[in-house]
Amino acid sequence: MKETILLRVNAEDPELEKIKIAAGVIRRGGLVAFPTETVYGLGADALNPEAVKGIFAAKMRPLDNPIIVHVADKEDAYKLALDVPESARKLMDAFWPGPLTLVLKASDIVPKVTTGGLDTVAIRMPRHKVALALIMESRRPIAAPSANLAGRPSPTLAEHVIRDLYGRIDVILDAGPTNIGVESTVLDLTSSPPQILRPGGVTLEDLKKILVEVVVHPAAAAKSEVHVEHARSPGMKHKHYAPKAEMIIVEGELNSVIKKVKELAEHYVRAGRKVGILATEESMCKYDLGIVKSMGSRRDLASVARNLFKLIRELDDERVDIIIAEGVPPKGLGLAIMNRLRRAAGYNIVEGR
Ligand code: AMP
Ligand code: MG
């Protein structure tokens, strides 16, 4: 077991002496978990192959799943990538710093372990002050996937990181809850038209304001498992976000969703199973069986995104056997939310009617 140092930092005004400790660890090839505006990341020096291997080992992450490289300056993207198209500059100007990751042709300085063996590199400039301070003090681009054990829900609190990775990494920077709660949007600019490989914090609708044409990869919006052997984003084919409990998503128009969730809850409670329900503000009062949690309001999908992973972990902690979750319309942030819910449930989807 490693000794893990836990440092509380101010999210708005990070204490420089603490950031310096963490940056020193990055520079020496160590592993630091840090907050971003999306979820907590597990960072290492992106240009040091041994350090990046450490991320895969700590997370038990499959080696073919590449890692996003985080920068604190747009110009760094031009060192890490080749043939950067004009559209990338427009997107950076519109959305960086922020939850948009750009997949570009990788330059030679990026180790193969960072790109999972691909000839592309995924780059983003996060908005969180702690993340930016850490990258700047390290004077290195930082490779960072979500700071959870592979397959588990992404961490939106330092407590989640502690739960999964304490004793496996060097430092955890705790700056409280993350703001967005779902990961960044991964946009592939090496395909034509540009393709969303993973819906996230920046929506399809947002991207359409900048790009003439943009499409969503079929697997990213799928309601059932899509065969992605040759996927542009290998993360799509790995098990992800999964609770320990079995999970069912009920999709459709709200009234029929409520009816179906009730039916399922009754069925499983009668069968002696402990049931958790992920509902919304508008619907939670309709349920009187099981442990009912509200993800947030249907009129404010940002609140749903923010709470999603935390609530899945809470229901696991309460040892429910089965989680029944309401779906939301896959528009705006709803597309990212449904992508996470469907994958968390292993595409165990029921249509309410
Ligand atoms: P996570 O590890 O949870 O932070 O997710 C990172 C996501 O970015 C995964 O879905 C990866 O497959 C994807 N990704 C990282 N690098 C690349 C790349 N070079 N090309 C395509 N997708 C990538
Ligand atoms: Mg992840």
Image (cartoon, grey):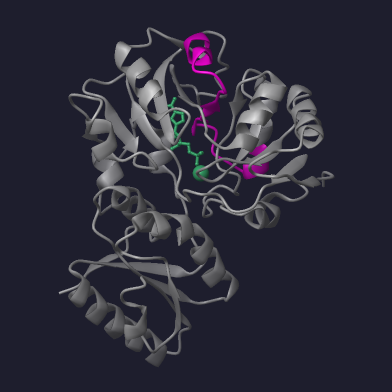
Q: Which residues are magenta?
A: 57-79
Quadrant of the rendered structure where residue 29 is? top right
Return the residue found at the far bottom: 270
Q: Position of residue 147 (x, y in %)?
A: 61, 44
Q: Report the residue at 36% width, 78% height from top.
A: 284
Q: Nearer the viewer, residue 126 or 33?
A: 126
| Residue 218 in view (yes/no) | yes
Q: Nearer the viewer, residue 55 or 160?
A: 160
Q: Report the residue at 45% width, 74% height from top.
A: 293
| Residue 344 in view (yes/no) | no
139 horizontally vs 313: left or right = right
Q: State the quadrant of the C terminus.
A: bottom left
Quadrant of the rendered structure where residue 58 is? top right
Q: Position of residue 239 (x, y in %)?
A: 45, 49
Q: Position of residue 287 (x, y in %)?
A: 35, 85
286 horizontally vs 139: left or right = left
Q: Is residue 111 above or below residue 245?
A: above
Q: Position of residue 91 (x, y in %)?
A: 35, 23
Return the residue found at the far right: 3
